[in-house]
Image (tube, rainbow, N blue to C red):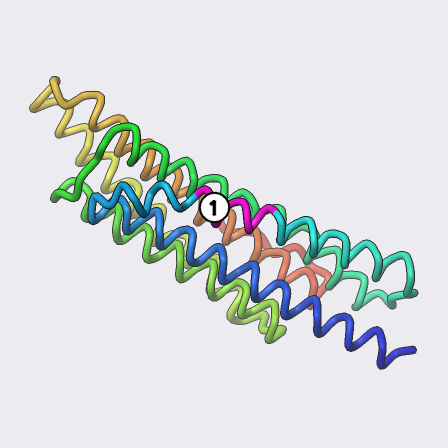
Amino acid sequence: MRKTFDDQLMQLNREMISMGALCENVIAMAAKSLLEGDMELARKVPVTDAEIDQKEREIESMCLKLLLQQQPVARDLRIISSALKMITDMERIGDQSADIAEIVTMANITASDDTLHIGNMARAAIKMVTDAVDAFVSRDVKAAVAVINYDDVVDDLFNKVKHELISLFGSSPEKGEYALDLLMIAKYFERIGDHATNIAEWVVFSITGRHEEAPE
């Protein structure tokens, strides 16, 4: 019985890795569409977002079956309940990447110096998501805490973008709508970083029973 349960937990890990990879891909697609002005790629982002939604439903069903059909001990229960929390944040990452792609498409934004720090935000967000999922699979508290702390990098980049766009708006009011679109995109990347932080916090909980939160 225990072997069957362990096999199912391993399958859960594999599905979490798969969903994490989809999240990495969808962020990268949204970022590339922005930085390279690739409208065709931007239109493909909702397709990957839909795959993430489907994966969320599959993992949720798997977790509920584990809870109902097995009798998990406290440690196993934390793993399963944390996975349920994590996939909610992953699903939101897909949604926000799709929102970014929609702005890129509707506003026809092209790469410029104004998008430099946003590109850095995207790369930092991808790193956070990747590292958080890896920490879950490897049961690595230290790696999860590193993700939580790394959110400061994304927040600092967001502040830089915000100040630059405020300056742009002040010097060129006719670019106001353009600046607001870029600010919204930056905010979505900042929120993706927050979701990666949430994932890492649930990783810590799944291992230690403590809900580690990012410092203020």
Q: Quadrant of the N terminus?
A: bottom right
With respect to residue 172, does 153 lie above or below?
Answer: below
Q: Position of residue 51 (x, y in %)?
A: 55, 50
Which of the 4 quarters of the picture holds residue 67? Answer: bottom right
Q: Position of residue 108 (x, y in %)?
A: 22, 32
In the image, taking residue 185 as reference, residue 212 lies left or right, namely right
**Residue position for label 1:** 47
Between residue 137 and residue 139, name the one nearer to us: 137
> Which residue lies most toward the top here?
174
Local secondary structure at mark 1: helix
Residue pictured at 39% horizontal, 54% vertical: 125
Magenta highlight on residue 190: no
Between residue 132 and residue 30, name the one nearer to us: 30
Residue pictured at 12% horizontal, 18% vertical: 173
Amino acid type at image mark 1:
Val
Which of the 4 quarters of the picture holds residue 76? Answer: bottom right
Q: Specify the principal SS of the magenta part.
A: helix
> Which residue lies most toward the bottom here?
3
Between residue 163 and residue 174, name the one nearer to us: 174
Segment colored magenta: 46-53
- The answer to whether residue 149 is seen in the rendering is no
Crowd tier of the residue under label 1, counting other residues whose Cα lies within 10 Å: few below 14, some 14–19, many 20 or above: few
Between residue 203 and residue 59, name the one nearer to us: 59
In the image, taking residue 60 as reference, residue 120 lies left or right, namely left
- The answer to whether residue 166 is seen in the rendering is yes
In the image, taking residue 167 as reference, residue 103 lies left or right, namely right
With respect to residue 130, does 178 lie above or below?
Answer: above
Q: Position of residue 123 (x, y in %)?
A: 32, 57
With respect to residue 142, does 188 lie above or below?
Answer: above
In the image, taking residue 183 as reference, residue 77 lies left or right, namely right
Q: Position of residue 143 (x, y in %)?
A: 51, 70
